[in-house]
Amino acid sequence: MKTSKLAEGLKGSEIIKIAGEVNALKAQGETIYNQTIGDFDANIFPIPDELKQEIVNAYHDNQTNYPVANGMESLRFSVSDYLSKNLKLDYSKDEILISGGARPLIYAVYQTILDLDDTVLYPVPSWNNDAYTYLSRNKAVIIETKPENKFMPTVEDIKPHIQLVNLIALCSPLNPTGTTFDKEALTEISQLVVEENKRRASLNEKPLYVLYDQIYWQLTYGDTVHYNPVELVPEVRDYTIFIDGISKAFAATGVRVGWAFGPSHVINKMKALLSHIGAWSPKAEQLATASYLKQEKPVSSYLTHIKSELHERLVTFYEGFNKLQKKGFSVKAIEPQAALYLTVQFDLIGKSTKDGLKLNTIQEVTSYLLNEAKLAIVPFYAFGTSTDSNWFRLSVGTVRKEDINTIFELLETALLKLNK
């Protein structure tokens, strides 16, 4: 029986498909190193003890009824203060909207900014912009980014389309690559948006907005600096909606506390939309987060710890791929900058095994790595790139450090079975 055209047209998730293959192999007793998940193993990366206790306290205090539609005032105050202290961004509590994680907020931006058949520009690889564009019944300008630019879009990529689009969706640090905007690139893009909006204002046209997803901003490593459009070009403030929250920096993906902030007229419309959907963050978790964000020493200590642990894993994987490359294997990795992801290339199309198995597609490469190396990773085409892209996302949020050597032993053995 048919459902709606919208439901019928939804694409299946490639990550879910890979998860099905992983689970099938596990059911056969195989040990699989599943690095597909953009999440944390809570036994390796638990949420902060102080946050956990605040959540427990809130439930003991019976804070279990409906929260305020735009988020508990205490949390919006805490977020406002946290942004001011850590990013020098000054947004009042009334310019902040709380929701059950980042996803409803991103969806709300699409629904609030875009009319039917409006156009959104987004780079690929990127997380879920294709789905949000489809669900909002919008047109898309898709920019396939380049490894030499760390898979980040440039002003040269965007400029030819600037007069044709209504929303630009950006993310830094980027899921799936773990790379970031540098200061110059983001400044140029932000200035371009300001100039385009001056042109539109003179013609009384609807503004061009920027969705800036910075959910990973606190997870940067080494000399990497997180930049945002408003600090670099203050005039873009009127056109920028930020997406943020505790999900990644505090390993709290299941706690479901996210926030958006931006121009009050946009935030108010997003609030109205989400109030009908009921996409609230639970009241107890909101109150707990409000209290936790004020605890500067525990917050700083936790961030230092989680960044150290994630960075160590990322660097170990990066060095492992460098060693394989030096041995002559067709692999490459981009040095990690942020988040919990490593960008890895497997240039294996056309290679074959001694028993006649030939790898003709990226799907076959993905399956080969899973079956022969017991390594599950996500091809970039799951994030919107062309299906012949040979780059992959490897996530370290669920990996045990003691397993990494085994992963590379299995991977080298699998690669040795292919002709060079």
Image (tube, rainbow, N blue to C red):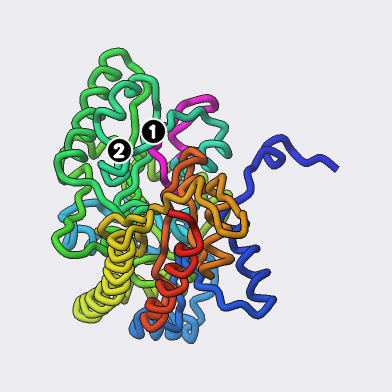
Instruction: Give 274 or 357, whichever is nearer the viewer.
Output: 357
Mark 2, residue position: 153
Q: Which quadrant is home to the C terminus?
A: bottom left
Coordinates of residue 328 in the picture (x, y in percent): 33, 58
* Residue at image coords 54%, 53%: 352
Coordinates of residue 91 in the picture (x, y in percent): 24, 51
Residue type at mark 2 is Pro
Q: On screen, 393 above or below 304?
A: above
Q: Is residue 127 magenta?
A: yes
Q: Point out the residue furthest to the front here.
A: 354
Q: Quadrant of residue 24?
A: bottom right
Mark 1, residue position: 143
Mark 1 vs mark 2: which is more N-terminal?
Answer: 1
Q: Secondary structure at mark 2?
A: loop
Local crowd size for mark 2, using a 10 Å CA cut-off: few (<14), some (14–19), many (≥20): many
Q: Secondary structure at mark 1?
A: strand
* Residue at image coords 24%, 31%: 155
Q: Which residues are magenta?
A: 110-128
Coordinates of residue 266 in the picture (x, y in percent): 38, 40
Q: Is residue 200 magenta?
A: no
